[in-house]
Structures are given as C-alpha cells and as structure tokens.
Amino acid sequence: MTTATAARPDFVQSNPVLWLNVVAGWQAFVSLASLAGIYFIWQSPTTPYWLQVLTTIILLLAAAASGASAFFIPRRQHVGRVLSLAVNYLGFVACLIGAAQALGIFISFNDLANTFGNGLPFLFIMFLGYLVSAFGDRYEDNQPAKEKMFRQAGQLIMLVSLVIFLFAINVLSGLLALAQRYDSPMPFGLTAGVIFFAAAMWLMWQQTLAETMNANNSSTEMLNGYLFLSPNLLGFLIFFGGPLLFSFYVSFTDWDAFGTKNFVGLDNYRRIINLTIVGLASPDQRAADVFDIKVYDELTRFSILGSGYVIGAQDKLFWLSLRNTLLFVIMAVPLSVIPALLLANILNSKLPGMKIYRAIYFIPSIAAVVGIALIWQLLYNATIGYINYAILMAVTLINTVFNANLVDPQIRWLSDSRTAMLSLVIMSAWQTMGFNTVLFLAGLQNIPRDLYEAATVDGANKMQQFRFITIPMLAPTTFFVLTTTTIQAMQLFDQVFILINPPSGPNNSTLTVVLYLYQNGFQRFQQGYASAIAWVLFAGIFGLTLLQFQHQRASAYEG
Amino acid sequence: MSNRTSTYLTNALAYIVLTAFAFIMVFPFLFMFFTSFKEPKDTFRYPPRMLPRQTLDVTVAGYDKPLPLYYVDDNGQQRQYALAESSIKIGIFAAPDKLETKYERPIKEIKPTGGFMNQKKATVNGKEEPLFDVEVDGQTIPMVKTNETIFGKFIDPASPDKTLLQNVRLSEPVEKLTAHPENYTEVVELQNMGRSLTNTTMVTLAVVLGTLLTSVIGGYAFARLQFPGRDQIFLVYLGTIMVPFVVLITPLYQLMVLIGWVDNMAALIIPWIFSAYGTFLMRQFFITIPKEIEEAALIDGASRFQILWYIFMPASTPALATLATFTFLYAWNSFFWPLVIINTGNEANHVLTLSLNVLRGRASDSPNLILAGAAISIIPPMIVFILAQRFFVESVTSSGVKG
C-alpha cells in the first residue's frame, strides 16, 4: 500500500494556476452553452412540452452552478471546485448515457445474445481459473512459492479465457458496427462532450489543483462519498424515484398509454373504492330497484337483525379481487407459518442430520414460481394427478380400517370455483414454508440457552418452556415472518397466471389485485386506472410495513 | 417409561415428522424429474406412477410389425405373449339349463343351431333366445349368447401357432424401466429453449455483476464516507426496499417506451442493477470491518478505490456471495416484468420463464415436454444452491434477525 501514490503529470503540477483558469473558462463556456441550449429547446417544435420544461430546469441549474464555479474558482474558494466537479461529472454521465443510447449500445444486448452462447464455455473456464487462484490461499502461511504459483496460473487462465470469450462473442465486429454508427453530428457531439467533461473533471481532481483550491481532508471525503454513491443514486433516481413520482401523477389521469392524458383528479380512486349499502324491503328485491345499476354492480347481500341489505360497487371486479387476495392471505399465511414454526423447533434440537433437512426444506423457495406452477398443474390434475390419487388412497384406507363409508370427492382442483383458490394456497404455502423455517430457526438459535436451563431448574416442563420462553423470545422473528409473508402474499400474481387457466379462474374466483392491475394496465391499457390500483395496494402494504417497523423499533428498545 | 426410552421415542417422532415434510418438499421435484424422462402415453397412465417405463415389443415370424408383449395367464402359468390382433368380438355362451357355466368363443366361428334360416330357440328367464352351436371338448352343445365382449389374440412369440384369447384391458403389458432424454432436445427445439437459456444466463450474469458493482461502491459510501445528506439518503433507501414492484410497473413500462427499450433485453438488465437492498446489505457488512486498517492505509496515501479493492473486497466474500446468490435467483426467476416488457411473439428475446409460459399452451398434451422445460429452468438455480448453500442460509438469517 506504500506505493499507492500515483505519479502526477508534470504539466499540471508545474502550472496549477494556468490550468485552474482553463477550467474556469470552461465553466463559463458551459454556463453560456446551457443558456443557449434552453433557447434551442424552445425552438424545436417536435419536443414534447414536459420534456422542454424538464430540460429547461436542468439546463438552468447547470448554467447557474457552472457560472458560480467560474466565479468562485479565480477566488480560490473551494465551493467553486465542488460545483465544477459536480457539473462536469453530471455532464460527463449525461453525455455518456446519451452517446450510448444514440449509438444503440444498450439495445445491442439483443445482438449480443446471438453470440453470447458461444462464449459461455470460456466464462466457465474463467471461473475454473478463479478457483485455481483461490486454491493458492491454502499455502498462504507456509509455502509462499506454491501460493504464488497457483495465483499466477489462475490469473493467466482467467486472462486467456477472457480474451477468448471476448472473441467468441464477437466483440470485435460489434465495435466495428459501433464505429459505423458515427454517421450523424449527434454521436460526435455527445462523444466530444464525454471527452471535454472528463478532461475538466480530471484536471480539477488533480492534487495540485485541489491544494490550490484549498481542499482539505473532509472535503475530499465528501467528494469521494458522492462519487461512490453516484452510480447507485443516479440509477435509483432514473429507474425508481422518477417512475414512482410519475406513477403517482398518472394515477390522477385517464391515460391509455398512448394518447393524451387528461387530469381527472381523484376519479380513479373514487371509482375503485366507491361502494353503496342500501336496505332491502324484501330479501329478493331486485338491485335495480334500490340503486342506480348504471353506476353500481351488485356485489353481495347480507342481513342483520332480520333486515336485508345489498352492497353495490362501482368497480365490482376490484372488490372481488380484493376479497380473493385477502382470502388468499388469510389462508396461505398461517398454512405457511405454523408448520414452519413447528419444523424450526424440531430442527433446533441438536440431533444429527438437521442441516440436511434444513437444506431440503429450502429447495422449493429457490425454484422459479413458473416452473413450480407447471409441476403442480399436473399434480392437481383431476383424473390422473397424484393429489387426487393420494386422496383416493386415503379414503380407501379409512374405509377399510374403520369400515367407514367415505366417498372419494374427485375434486376438480383448478376448474372448480370452490377449490381454485385453495390450490393456490397449498402450492404457495408449500413454496414459502422452507424459507420461513430457516428464518424461525435463526430466531430460535438467538435465544440464550441459559434461559431454558434456569427454567428447567425451576421445574418448568417442555410445554411451559415453549409457552413462556420460546413464544415471547421469538416474537420479533414471528412478526417479521408474518409481515413479509403477508406482503408477499398480497402481491400474488405469477402463481395465478401459470397455474389457473384463464388466470382469473372459474367465476373470477382467483382474480387477485395484481392480476386485475395487469389486466387493466397491459391488456386494456388503462394505465391511469392501473396506477391508481397499484397505489391503493401500496397503501395497504405500506400500512403493514409501518406496523412492522414500529414493532421492530419497540422490540429493539426492549431488547 | 424410563427417561431414556422417552427421549428415544421423542427423537423417533421428530425424525418421522421431519421426513414426512421432507418428502412433501421433494416429491414435486422428483415427479418433475422422472416425468421429464417419460414417453407421452406413460404420463397419462392411471394410477400414476413415478418411474418412466415403456412397453416391450417383440418381432414374431409372419408379422411385419413388432407386436406388444403382455403378461397372460396360460393354464395357471404366467407367460409373456405378443398381442397379434386386438379387437376380436367374443360371445359369452352358456347352455340354457346351465347358465352359470360360461364359455367364451369368437362370434365369427360360432354357427346358429339348425342353420341361419331356421335357427332354434330356447326360453331363458321367460324370454326366447336364439341358440348357437358351441363346441366344448369335442362335443357340440346348443347354447344361448349371454353377453359380448372384445378380446385380443395373444400368441407365444416362440411358437406363433400357440394362441390365446384374452381381454386386453385386463392384461398387464410387459414393461421395462426406460428414460427418454430426447425429451430435452425435443423441448429445446420446440420452444427455442437454447436461446432462452442463453438469454437468461446473459441477463442474470449482467444483473448480478452490475448489482455487485453498484452495491459495493454505494455501500462503502454509506458505511465509511462522511458527506452531507448521507443519513437522509440512506433512510430513503431503506424505505424503498418496502415499495412493492407493482407500483413501479406501469411507469417503468412508460419509461421503457420513452427510451425505446420495449421488447429489448436492456430493459431486463439496466433498471435492475441499482439495488437498494444490495446497497443496504453491503453497508451493513462494511460497518463491521475495523476502521484502523483503513486509517493506516489512508495515511500511507492509498486512494479510496484502492482501499475498497484491496482491503474491503477480500474481507467481504460472504456478503458478496450472499448478494450474488440472491440477485441470481431474483433475476433468473423473474416473470412479471419480462411478461410485460417482452413481446410474446418475439421468441428470440424470451427468457426461460416466458418460454415456459408459452410452452404451457403449446405442449399441453405432452406433460413430459412441459416438465423437461421446467427442469431446464429449475436445475441451474438448484446447482447454485448446492454450491452456495451456506451463503443462502446466512443471508436469510441476517435479513430476518437484523431486519
């Protein structure tokens, strides 16, 4: 680590003041160019209005920051250096992304897939090379010569296979194709931007210039911090923060994904949650007599204290999907969590072979839901499936042993509206049980042993120990398991989509909220309405999360 | 009951419960594995059975096609005979005065008693029934037809003259264990699974490498560098782990439309390499590394990148492996987003989950092919799981207990 200091380029070192002035001049130029950019963006008639506004805001900020840094750099105030670095870095990233987008680098993943398969064997050899090099660790302490040999051999293998890999996937012709796309001013301009911003940034980053600008340790650390965080933060803003805000906005419009959006206020939300409850004169009175059936669909009827009521909903399908989702949560969560708790308690005994069982239980949770659902679809088959066969065997066994007269139910699991949801519940519980078991096991292993020892001395039996030590000490884990399983269950989609055909199920009995969202957003293309459904679902999930956070905080203070 | 027997019984009970659950957990995968090696007609057999079997054929002199072998009962002996003819009409005959003794004869060979024109009749159970001449041990006895059925003609492969009539449906075919690994090549060709396997591998590798990169440097910044707004940004990151993906799906789709990534694999890669969860995980690991080593390196003039690369990276293999395995599973198994962003018709861009979705409809009459496809998508993560089991369990543990 002693030789870490990089060699400094002499031409910068010898005359920092000159180069600072160059950068200051560059910043002034960027500031003016940004203002010119604003003028041009409003001259272009094809640019959509929102993009014009957004670009104007960004360019105004860039112009202001760049101008300020051109002002502060000659005064040797460090804020000038920070602003200059920020503007140049962001300019660099913007030009880089723009150039990559203009040259079609991102979308060339599709072409890469044509040749990527050829390279896979060499990637595997590269991995073997890594193993060889890691094998050197064994000789780290006593045989440095052997360690070095393994490391170098491994690195050589990795390097050679990397080169062959790049050739095999035809990177060379890809680069040539890239060069041919430099046929318009756009990629040239963006590439020039990349080079100039990078150069200005590099100059300002130099030690001599930093010292001239009165940089200190904490300012260096701050710049490093932003630099390190920036890839993550920028990606996060582009692909998460921005879309999140946009989604919120879209949920107040009637957008169909292609046409213009009209702001409709709370209409989407009102349509989702609009319910009416009306009293009935007689239990079989027609719904049309009591409310406007152009607005409401009859959802359900019930009676309290002898008088009947009917519930009408403006969007009947949403309420059905909500009911189905809640039904799924209520059934699937206990079915997954309670056996997991039992299994974890058994696994926590120090018997031999527990690790093997733990590994086996974990397997279902690593497999793709799509693959799992295809397997279960066949297991659930009404005529030849194993599940009905097992039921038949059980019925026959009971009949012979107890001389009973049970009839084989012959359940049509997936096409009967009474069992379709149950099929999903069983499959999902099966898939998540092992994961929850491992979570519970981790929680159990954190309970101090001496608590049990003390209880045994005091004469508590196993049941009492479970009731008064395990349950309370495991409460934080239980809560975590319950909330995560519930949150996951509320987003049920993949399972339904593959297992049930059509996914909404017989009589809409497996229409879940996310499935309804998918149908609205991507089959009917009512994206405004779909966004509103997403936010309603999010509100529910957020409530649960908040509950979990508060619980965890409370238990952290107690603990 | 002594204390020792009671412990012994408890342990036995524990193993029984554990094994029962292990069986339930593993059974669907065994079913998938074995069914993927079956031939189509074997998958529709009832009662269902696990191992793939195929019927045996035998070539018999005088027949141009190989004949299927069956177990037949030849005078109390179980023998393997070939089925030569399958739909021979059989009449079940009995003498009018002795209805309980039944004889089965091919209808073609039986002549009416007294000739076709003047068939004799007998009264049985108050009804007039026509009589037929049935030969029993060299004697011809007039009998009535009580029923009809269809038999098959079985012949001894060793001596084709020796024939036997028997109900085919009640005869067990001779079968042997088999395996049809060609199901895999067939499904690969049918659904272009080779391409979708390549696509999935490429997407997964890119997402794992990208996530590791951004998470490591982001996690380092959160763990070790002081800058204004750090803790606030971290809090926002924490909060977003809880935002369900469905909230993002429509706006993210719109963003992809805007930048022209719809039906493009870039949409499966680039948005997914910025992981709040990964950053959080790496940050949690990095804050446990002692500060002293880092400070010494800083005094020696090492840059932050050098510190991260030479000190932090080698020390964080477990955290990196955890993040890599989790990201691997997430990318490999994801379905909803590819379903939305990749066109169903464009099979060149399908990942495995999308291929399976199409295969489900296309091969609905061959479960063996569907499950071969499912196996192609499930076995790679299983191998990763076996190799990196320790890290899986560790990561679940850390995510669960520390929250």
Image: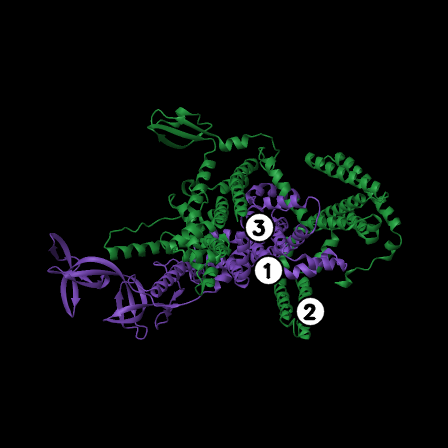
Please tell me how crowded label 1 is: few (under 14), some (14-19), or many (20+) other residues with Cα within 10 Å.
some
Distance Cα–Cα, label 3 vs label 1: 39 Å
Q: Nearer the viewer, residue B87 or B8?
A: B8
Distance Cα–Cα, label 3 vs label 2: 40 Å
Instruction: Decide: is B180 above or below A479.
Output: below
Residue A41 visible within the image: yes
Apparent colour of chain A: green
Q: Secondary structure at mark 1?
A: helix
Q: Secondary structure at mark 3?
A: loop
Query: Mark 3 or mark 1, which has the lower sequence index?
Result: 1
Q: Which label belongs to residue B346?
A: 3
The chain ID associated with circle 1 is B
Tell me: B159 left or right of B212. Answer: left
Looking at the picture, how far across and down is residue A303, in whole percent? 35, 30
Q: Nearer the viewer, mark 3 or mark 2?
A: 2
Q: Nearer the viewer, residue A203 or B161?
A: A203
Tell me: B226 left or right of B161. Answer: right
Q: Secondary structure at mark 2?
A: helix
Looking at the picture, how far across and down is residue B249, in whole percent? 57, 43
Q: Amino acid at mark 2?
A: Leu
Instruction: Decide: is A415 above or below B328.
Output: above
Apparent colour of chain B: purple
Looking at the picture, how far across and down is residue A114, in whole percent? 62, 57
Q: Which label belongs to residue B318?
A: 1
Q: Give the residue number, with chain letter if any, for mark 2.
A: A156
Distance Cα–Cα, label 2 vs label 1: 25 Å
Q: Amino acid at mark 1?
A: Pro
Instruction: Decide: is B68 above or below A506.
Output: below
The chain ID associated with circle 2 is A
Q: Are marks 3 and 1 in contact (CB under 8 Å)?
A: no
Please tell me how crowded label 3 is: few (under 14), some (14-19), or many (20+) other residues with Cα within 10 Å.
few
